[in-house]
Amino acid sequence: MICEQEITEVVNKIRKSLLRMTFRQLQVFRSVCDHHSYSRAAEEMALTQPAVSLQIRQLEELLGQPLFDYVGKKLYLTEAAEALQVASEDIFGRLESLDMQLADLKGSLQGQLSLAIESSAKYFVPHLFAAFRREHPEVSLQLTVVNHSQAVRRLSANRDDLLIMSQVPSDMALEFLPFLNNPIIAVAPPDHPLSQAESLQLQDLCDWPLLVREPGSGTRRACEEYCHQKRAHFAQIQEVGSMEGQREGVLAGLGLALIPRHAVRRELQLGLLRELPVAELPLLRSWCVMHPRGKYLSPVAQAFFNFVRDQRKQIGVLAEQFSGVSNSL
């Protein structure tokens, strides 16, 4: 039977091993995780592939566990690697936060905002960040555009400072703030027969092909749930994989689309597309800025969250200028 003293000795030994990890080793490790490749990590880190392998092997010796598995030609993270990845994100996040705090002590907000957004928000968020940056000109942006499923995975892994998405996962402990409507409308080419109608029901669209996003898209899921609720069942569905694909497909006459108004604002303004007068539309969802509950926010992330919270009226005005339609909450 193992006594308490032996357990304490083992724990202390592990702690001493972890303290021998270097920031360089963690940087190399994170690069391998991002690229799932030793060779690509070597290119990014300006190292040779054997040097990368050596750094990973030294980390594995310190941890006493393998970090990566090769299945066929693909590299996969072990459970130990996933745990180390979360810890390394926290370590480097705190160092970046320290840098921001030191800059804040000098009287200016500096640093980078790591922001992940659902693809439906990518047309408006750059304008939102530009308004924020006018108040904090020394802040830069790292923007990652994902679909809903990818956004949920990034939330779980704590990959970003903040996320902007429209459907808040109900099974996660999150701090979230709704700040702007995301209206989903039906669009068609101007020469389409439905474009001449003065009023329509959602079911009137069902005889025509509908262009939809890829599986995992929050917009697609919201539209499918809404159409099912309204008993609007489309006989022909064509998957095009992106909002750009939807937009171009409608322009080409391949079908109709249920799409965020922000994604087609230019085409609507130029008369290249028409918003169909469907009584049950637009479908209104709210964009929300969020982070895991209890997460420590860097000064830059906290400043952006506060900006969105305190400037919602101004954000609504900005959205009206952006789209020509009122979108404030």
Image: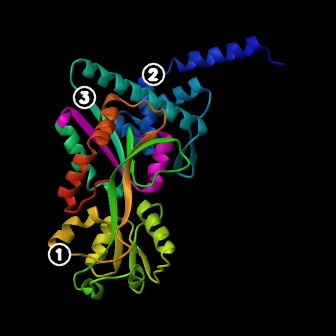
In primary-sequence order, the first of circles 1 and 3 is 3
Q: Amino acid at mark 3?
A: Gln
Q: Position of residue 104 (x, y in %)?
A: 26, 22
- Is the Cβ of the residue at disc 2 closer than 8 Å to that at disc 1? no
At horizontal 25% and vertical 80% (from top left) the residue drawn is: 189
Residue 114 magenta-highlighted: no
Residue 174 pos. (x, y %): 48, 42
Answer with the quarter of the image where residue 95 lies.
top left
Instruction: Name the amino acid, label 1.
Output: Gly
One can see residue 38 in this view? no
| Residue drawn where x is 34% and y is 80% of the image | 255
Please give the range of residues in magenta.
135-160
Label 1, on which residue?
A: 271
Label 1 secondary element:
loop
Which amino acid lies under the numbered mark 2 shown in the image of this protein? Thr
Mark 3, other Cα within 10 Å: few <14 / some 14–19 / many ≥20 = many
Q: Please tell me whether residue 213 is drawn above or below residue 136 in the rendered image.
A: below
Q: Nearer the viewer, residue 316 or 2?
A: 316
Q: Nearer the viewer, mark 1 or mark 3?
A: 1
Between the residue at mark 1 and the residue at mark 3, the CA separation in whole angstroms equals 42 Å
Along the line of sight, the residue nearer the viewer: 174 or 65: 174
Task: Give the residue furthest to the right.
Answer: 1
Residue at mark 2: 22
Tag of residue 161: none
**Quick check: 206 above or below 323?**
below
**Scheme by which the image is coloured:** rainbow
Which label sits on residue 110? 3
First in sequence, mark 2 or 1: give its number: 2
